[in-house]
Image: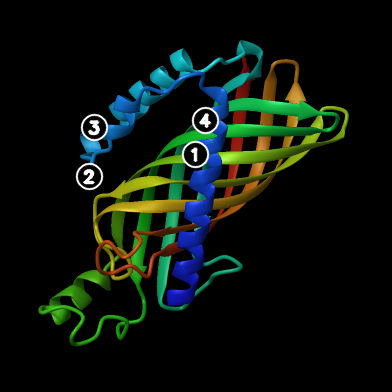
Amino acid sequence: MGLINSNISTFRGAFFVGISVIFAKLFKRVPKESMKIIPQKISVKYLFPLIYFGLLSFSTAAQLKKENIKVGFASGTGSQNRYPFNLSDYSHDVLFYKVLLNYTLKEKRKWAFELQIEPSYNVAEHQMLNQWFVKPGDYDNWEEKRDLYLQKRTIKEYVLNIGFMVRYKLIGNLSTYALGSVGPMISDKATERLAKGYAFSDVFGLGLSYQIKRWQVGFQYSVRHTSNLEMKYPNSGHNTTNTELSILYQL
């Protein structure tokens, strides 16, 4: 597990560097003062206002082409009890709703390179199935924690993923794509595998899209991992395999 978390941390670092390069190319000038506004802790009630003002700043500062912008909505489900995960230690099922903000960075023949921002609201049902996952020494009140985590509980997550998408046009209006995204999230409850509060959401997905004039409908299959970079205990994280449907409109 330590090796897996190390590899995920490396992926996150490389991904954020890549996103920074993209933003540097899109922006003519970024005030140095804006780089100093990095909150250490983010309250849930401030999350979506921050998303709104961040996107507003992006749209006004960047040299965006309106015809390259798509906005939309997606919804789907995910479960730990699907390939390739399906661990016997716990169950974790999630229902999620996303706002999709997509910008085409470059097109070349049948290829397209896109930036996608995905604020989302997730509702997860979680239950520890292996009662020995929580052991003496894990917590001072380990028996109380074990009894709590053996119950099925509802967890709410507030997520902001930023992703890079590579798209390939197959035939006609049909295209396929690969998406990698990383972003911060806040959860309102702890589990035996992940502490309450701030964490990261990592997603890799493959999808199909069909263009109908200005509308684009899509299906995506993805895997997701959440963990907190060892900022809090525990940090085993949650894994889900997800399916979702989306619709976007080109401005």
Measure how far apart labels 3 and 1 are at the Cα level: 18 Å
Total labels: the figure holds 4
Q: In the rendered structure, which amino acid carries the disc numbered 1? A: Ile
Q: Which residue is mark 1?
A: 162
Locate residue 128, reporting x and y percent.
33, 72
Nearest to N terminus: mark 2 or mark 3: 2
Q: Is residue 20 left or right of residue 52?
A: right
Q: Which residue is mark 2?
A: 40
Q: Which residue is mark 3?
A: 46
Tell us which disc is closer to us: 4 or 2.
Answer: 4
Locate residue 240, reporting x and y percent.
50, 60
Q: Nearer the viewer, residue 165 or 193?
A: 165
* Mark drawn on residue 23: 4
Question: Residue at coordinates 18% horizontally, 74% vertically from top-left?
Answer: 145
Question: Residue at coordinates 24% horizontally, 50% vertically from top-left?
Answer: 188
Q: Is residue 212 left or right of residue 84?
A: right
Q: In the rendered structure, which amino acid carries the disc numbered 3? A: Tyr
Locate residue 173, reporting x and y percent.
82, 27
Q: In the rendered structure, which amino acid carries the disc numbered 2? A: Gln
Q: Secondary structure at mark 1?
A: strand
Tell us which disc is closer to us: 4 or 1.
Answer: 4
Residue sitting at the far left:
140
